[in-house]
Every structure is written in structure tokens, then in C-alpha cells.
Image: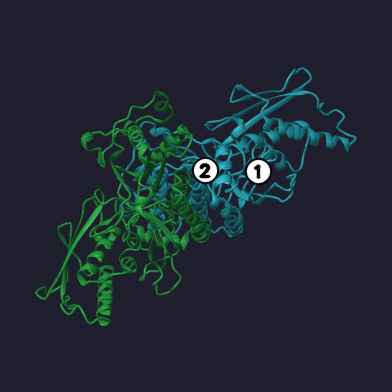
Chain colours: A cyan, B green
Amino acid sequence: MLSLAGGKRDNDLILPINSSLSVTLHQDQLKTTTTAAASQDFTEDRLWLNGEEADVGHPRLQACLREVRRLARKRRGSSTEDTAALSLSYKVHIATENNFPTAAGLASSAAGYACLVSTLARLYGVEGELSEVARRGSGSACRSMLGGFVQWQRGERPDGRDSIAQQVAPETHWPELRVLVLVVSGEKKQVGSTAGMQTSVDTSPLLKHRAEVVVPERLALMVRHIHERDFEGFGQLTMQDSNQFHATCLDTFPPIFYLNDISRQIIALAHRFNAHHGCTKVAYTFDAGPNAVIFMLADTVAEFMEVVRRSFPPTTNGDQFVRGLPVSSASLPEELIAAVVAEPVPGAVQYILHTKVWGWVEHGAGEPICLSSGLCMGPHPHPHPWGCA
Amino acid sequence: MLSLAGGKRDNDLILPINSSLSVTLHQDQLKTTTTAAASQDFTEDRLWLNGEEADVGHPRLQACLREVRRLARKRRGSSTEDTAALSLSYKVHIATENNFPTAAGLASSAAGYACLVSTLARLYGVEGELSEVARRGSGSACRSMLGGFVQWQRGERPDGRDSIAQQVAPETHWPELRVLVLVVSGEKKQVGSTAGMQTSVDTSPLLKHRAEVVVPERLALMVRHIHERDFEGFGQLTMQDSNQFHATCLDTFPPIFYLNDISRQIIALAHRFNAHHGCTKVAYTFDAGPNAVIFMLADTVAEFMEVVRRSFPPTTNGDQFVRGLPVSSASLPEELIAAVVAEPVPGAVQYILHTKVWGWVEHGAGEPICLSSGLCMGPHPHPHPWGCA
């Protein structure tokens, strides 16, 4: 949350215009797995994304590789051990796979870069603060280096050394928290996130106000809600900040629309659901696209899932409509149906992923979901289906 | 324009939180006609809207009636003539008709209240500053009391005496200016404007910033663009301010959406059209609903109309698709079609109204169209299909 409203202070170093906060999602559902090897037999650095070879020369990928090697060199310089360590001159082969559909490859994925940096660090025997390195690949990747609730400190230094991720709370702090990702059908995104973000910074008077005035206040408040496990406060702020992020997209010129009519219907559904219960039971957030990420506590999942199923019934893939963690069935009271479920729109939601907050990120890296702004507006590309890449 | 971002300082007096600006549209296309009579034979005040009797007791209608009678009394008090004048104790019968479809009646129409006040003033022989009286009926009605380009001064006084309309320029100042209203099909508005506006004022941090900082600057700039007949500047600012108004709606909690996917497609079409021409040829603005109001100069109408017709072809009512002022036919260059016209969406636009800026408002009153914000956010209801009522 409040991951938003970024835009760049510095494009090469990927420094955001404000701090941000996200949760890292469980890896069973949204995981990137990366394998790296170095050998004197390799003649060049090579990269495979989901089985297909890709351009290893991407400047951001090269920046990560360079930074990890620099840290390794530094480490060895101050140590007499590690004589058996891998030569830093060896070329590397990197293979990375996502277990979730992704429109773009590594270059656009927070999880992807976080995982790449973890893997390379392991390969070269580097430890310690690596979020700064991951940030050079994709801004919000710095948050994916940690599990649970993670803040990306904007930092003040021009060299970006203090623009790093810090854990606000581990995932064990709030074990009841659940996430439903509603993947909306159709429509390819029209604006790349990076281009969009820079245009927002250049043209939106409201974004400037948001980054300078609104976000700092909200971040402090959000951290408190998380510490207190206050779902009411957490949920309200998550929704408000998602909406405000999309408001700044609309205030961009030409305007950027990530939400479509289905997104709007999901938003309205969430508000009707909460109104019916008289409190915040579910909280939506939207990244740079129409898919909804909806937070709730575990005891709400079955009921809300049934509400979604009735509102956006599956057309063809009924058996694969719900994925991820199991969901028990619920029967809805008539009053709830009357008050909450609108005219069904079959096929509007492609499928639903049920997941939760993830803790320690090891070899893989979990997708981060911005808690409030709906978009991790770091100055980096992240045109993939959900999460802040 | 900049008519926006209102919200109320005072609900009874209908005082806005910022100044605003609009154009009054030509009455052949969008006209309200009101007739009023007073007689000692009438036993009560009565009102007919489009032929059906309506509640004359509406507080805002009563406020207008009371204010006009007060001014008449004041005038007579300082005069020895007018002995033959109408008794102020006579009851009145009022009949009002719109020549355009309207979802709600007089209570929601700027043109309606402007016309009512003009008519009553004529009946009672009152002259002079009447925009303040019209404002008591419907905030933006004060602007409809004048033709051409009209500013509604926010004013400073708590009693609202300085919250009045002033003409920025007459319609003759820019005779080439044309307006297309694209009436979008379907979907009834979900949020009443008044309720929406008050919620915006209460919950949107961005609206506060907009009203205090952004709008005053933009208003001054817009007046300059109008005086200089600078369509490039006028158009850009009109679009930016419409977008910013809708951004503040999204920043409202719960969020308010007036634009739908068709509105978004129209916006994208306008930007592609301008990009193809390398300058601002058309400028959209949206009120509290999905219908687009598009400004352009007369020499652009034929070409843009053909672009709209190809993008949103009529389904059933081809013969009534274009209404209002005549439009000559145009054949589009292939490059323009390739660059601008997207996949056609038949039936998405119900019909198109071609009109222009109107000058002096006599018995009738023209619809005002907000030049930039897309919505006259005065603290008053205006849920009707277009214009700021």
C-alpha cells in the first residue's frame, strides 16, 4: 500500500519519489524460480525466461549482474578465505520460470528480479543487504527480497544507498490475512507502466501533491494498522490509496486508465458487501491493470468467494475457476444476495486465485502486492498481470 | 471549465468552494422554455414540468420564488410608479419544457432554474443582477443567465451576495467554436451528483488541493485562452481539467465513476485524432455521466464526425444519428483511418448533437457546458444527461 505514487527521482538508479509498502504473496501460488550457473566453459552470459532464450543485455539485468559481482569482489578483497570461490570472470547462464501467467518476462517482474538477485548472490557467496541491488533491476523488486509486510524506504541519498526495503512485520504477525486475485478477462493494457509513470510525474498536479503530502501520512497510518492488525483501518486505507493512485493516472495527460467497467463492478460489489456487513470485510486494490487484488480475513473467504461466483459466474472453465488455496463452500443468506449480488456478468472474471501473505523468501521470490495504492509506482516497467513487478 | 471541483461552502445558499467557468450552448438544440402567470383567481402556486404537474414545494424552487418577490417588493418600495403592477400576493402557475431529454426535472437543471428566474423576473418587472437568485435554485444556473463564456465567481461573503455570474466573452467573440455531444448508450447513473459532490468534499484529499491550488491558476489561464481564441491552449486545458475532475471523483470514498469504457474509448479516439494532426483539433469534457462533450472549430466538424461515425456506427437509428446543426460530409484519408479509427463498436454512441455557443439568453435559457472540469461541481443536484445543470 502506499506503494504508489512513485515516479522516479533518478531513472538509472531507480529511486522513487516516495516510500511505499507492500505485502509479499505466498509462493505456492505466485512464484518465480531462478537457477544460475557459472562456468569457465560458458562463452557468454545467457538467459532463459520460461524456457525461451531472452536478451541478456537488458540494461537493468546487466546492472544487477554488475552489482552482485561488485559486492562479491569487495567481499573477497576483505577476506582471505574463499579461494575456491567461483571466478568472477566466468560467464553465467540463468534460467527463470514463473508459476503464474505473465505478459512480459523478467524485465517486468519484481519477483523475477528479486529472485535473480537472490540466486546470483548465492552463486557468488554474497550476503547482507541485497534489496538495493534488486531495486536496480525493478524498483519494487527490492520489496520482494523480504517476506511479510515490507516498506521500501524512499531514501535521501543521491546514490540510492539508503533506498532499500525493510520488513514492517513478518507474515506470522497476521496469519489470518487472505488474498483473492480476480483476474479480469480481455483487454490488453494500453500503456506501459514505465512510460505511464513518467508521464504522470511530468503532467499530473495531483500526483505531486499525493507524493509530497498524502503518502507520507498514509504510510505511517498503514504501518500502525498492520501492527495493530486492524483490518477496518487497513482495508479502508488500502482501498482509498488504490483509488487515489488511479485518480493520479486519470489526472495524467493524456490520461491513463487501468480500471475498466469490470473493475468498477468489482469495486461496487466490495462496497455493497461491506455495507451489508456494516464494516470493512473486504478491501480491493488494483495495480496497473484491471485485475482486482482483494484482502480479507480467513473467515470471510468462503462467503465472499460465493458472492463473486454468483456475480461473475464462470462460462467455460468452472472447474479451474478457483485456484490456489482451498476454499470451503458457503451458502448465502437471501438478504445478502438481495443486497449485494447484482445482475450476473458471466465470464467477466476469468479465474480467481486464493493466496496469502508469505514469509521468508528463499530461492524463489514471491509476488509483492501493493497494499494500498494498487500500483507500485516505482520508476520501472511492470506490465504483468498482477502484483507490483 | 474549471467549473468543477465545487462542493459547497454553504448548502442553503449554494456557495461553491471555487470559481468556475462554462459556455452556454445554443438554444435551438438545448433549450428550456418557461411560462409563468400570476392571478388573483389562482388558489395556489403550481408547477408543470414537460406537461406533468410537479411539486412546487421544492425548497430551491421556493427560494427562487421568494427571492424574486423580495426584489420586486424592494423595487416597488423605492418607486412611486408601477401601481398597476402585479400583486405580489397572487399565486403563480409555472410551466416549463425542455427540448432535450432530461432524466430529472426542473430541480436538476441549470437551464431550468435560469429560465425560471428570468421568467419570474419578467413577470414581476424585476431587472438587474439575477444570477445570484438563479444560483439559489441550482448553483450552475447562475451561469446560464448569461450567454457566451461565463464565469461563476466563488465570492467571499458569507451571505453569497458576491457569488455571481459574469460574462468572460460573448459568443460572438469566437464564432467558429462548435460542440458535439456524444450521447453514450446504456447505464443509468449510480450516484446522484449532489450526494457525490458532498462525499468528494468530505473524503477526497485531492479535491481540496485541486480547489485551493489548481483551479485558481487554471481559471486565469482559461480566461486568457478564450480571450486569445487559442484553441490549442483552450482544448488542452479543457481536457486536463475534465480528467482532473473525474480523478477527484475516483479519489472520493467510496469512489464515484461517471466515465465508462465507452467514455474511455472516446477519450482515446480524441487523443489519436489530435496526435494524427499534430495539434489539438478536438477537446473532450465529461460532466457527471459518460456522455462526451467535444469542442472543436467549425472546419473540423465534418472530418471528426465521420471518424466518430466509423468508430461508433449507429445500429438502428442511422437517420437520427446526427442531430442539431447540419454537418457536411467528409471522406477520410486512408492514413487517418489507419491511425485514428479503432475497431468499430456499433451502437456505443446513441446519437450525436451538433451545436454551438449561444449568446443572449432571453425567455429561454441555454444549457451550460463546463469547459474544463467536465462537471459543474456546485453543491446542487444535476443528474441530467449533459451540461451542468
Give the letter of the chain under mark 1.
Answer: A
- Above or below, comparing residue A106 to residue B108 in the picture: above
Question: Mark 2 packing: few (<14 Cα in 10 Å), some, or many (20+)?
Answer: many
Label drawn at residue A287: 2
Q: Position of residue B337 (x, y in %)?
A: 39, 27
Label drawn at residue A14: none
Q: Is A106 in front, or is B238? A: B238
- Above or below, comparing residue A375 to residue B115 in the picture: above
Q: Is A324 in front, or is B247? A: B247
Give the Cα distance between marks 2 and 1: 23 Å
- Which comes sooner in the sequence, label 2 or label 1? 2
Q: Disc 1 marks which amino acid?
A: Trp
Q: SS at mark 1?
A: loop
Q: SS at mark 2?
A: loop
Q: Is residue B211 left or right of residue B143?
A: right
Residue position for label 1: A360
Q: Where is residue B368 in the image (x, y as percent from the top left)?
A: 33, 54
Which residue: 21% across, 79% down? B81
Residue A289 appears in view:
yes
**Residue closest to the far left:** B41
Q: Disc 2 marks which amino acid?
A: Asp
- Above or below, comparing residue A157 to residue B95 in the picture: above
Q: Tell if the residue under mark 2 belongs to the same chain as the one under mark 1.
A: yes
User: Does the residue at mark 2 contact the one at mark 1 (Cβ under 8 Å)?
Assistant: no
